[in-house]
Amino acid sequence: MVVSQTSIESFIEILPKIGGRQELVIRALYILGSATNRMISENIKLPINSTTPRVFECRKKGLIELDKVDICLATLQREKLERNANYWKLTKKGMKVLNFKNRQNDNKII
């Protein structure tokens, strides 16, 4: 199937623009599957107060959604506390953005 240049440009325009840290969040969720803010924070090696706003921005853009509410395994392991937390997962839109970003990175000349 041949895709016209205008179709590609239209597709690129409708994709949400994401920053570097937002991309880290969706990449972490791709790897982890379902995770809390703290689990994402530990995966991307950024403080929780830098990660939580990026998770919120990704939610607003429709890239991630609530998966479940359950005990946060990272908090349980680190602090020995059973605290409920929201677990997030990628949406189909989030997967499309991630796939597009991966293709862009594959086409870069180093």
Image: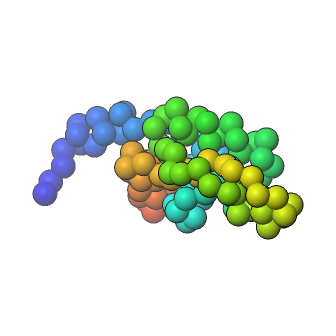
- At horizontal 28% and vertical 43% (from top left) the residue drawn is 8
Residue 102, image x and y in percent? 46, 58
Q: Position of residue 80 (x, y in %)?
A: 84, 64
Residue farthest along the right direction in this orientation: 79
The foreground one among 7 and 27 is 27
**Residue at the farthest front position:** 82
Q: Nearer the viewer, residue 43 or 18?
A: 43
Q: Is residue 10 above or below residue 98?
A: above
Quadrant in which the C terminus is drawn = bottom right
Determine the residue positioned at 69% across, 50% down: 84
| Image coords of residue 82 (percent x, y) | 76, 58
Q: Is residue 40 visible?
A: no
Identified at 70% across, 57% down, the residue is: 72
Residue 37 in the image: x percent, y percent?
68, 49
- From the viewer's perspective, tell me whether residue 88 is left or right of residue 3: right
Residue at image coords 59%, 35%: 57
